[in-house]
Image (tube, rainbow, N blue to C red):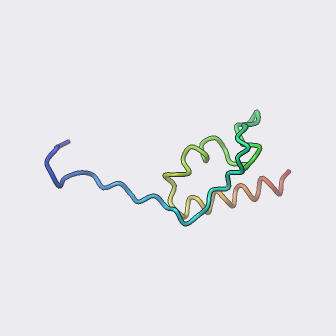
Amino acid sequence: MSNRPGRRRQRPTPDTTVASPCTGVCTLDSQSICVGCLRSQDEIRDWMIMSREEKLETIQRVQQRQADQ
């Protein structure tokens, strides 16, 4: 990888259009699902780098987990 000026890899701009479902109750259950927001540990970790579409898909999974409770 070259360190020449102007050749830096562009990072995607983080999506800020979808609000995080975090409720501030950050405790994982035995299946690594947060008891507050119902996101998985991976979904929580990756939230800031997810695209808008990925975040909306995550919200749908959260809603399904709510319905299943």
**Residue nearest the observer in this picture, 60 or 24:** 24
Out of 17 and 30, give the one closest to the viewer: 17
Q: Position of residue 21 (x, y in %)?
A: 67, 55
**Outermost residue toward the bottom in this view:** 17
Going 70% across and 37% down the picture, which residue do you hit? 32
* Quadrant of the frame with the N terminus: top left
Name the outermost residue toward the front.
24
Residue under the point 70% across and 56% down: 61
Q: Residue furthest right?
A: 69
**Left or right of 35 in this view: 52:** left
Residue 29 in the image: x percent, y percent? Answer: 76, 36
Q: 21 left or right of 50?
A: right
All told, the count of numbered labels is 0
> What residue is shown at x 62% (from left), y 56% (from top)?
20
Q: Residue furthest left?
A: 4
27 w.r.t. 7: above or below: above
Q: Is residue 63 left or right of residue 56?
A: right
Q: Residue 19's x, y, as percent?
A: 61, 61
Q: Quadrant of residue 63?
A: bottom right
Quadrant in the rendering for residue 27: top right
Expressed as whole percent of the image width and height from the top left, the position of residue 13 reads: 41, 60
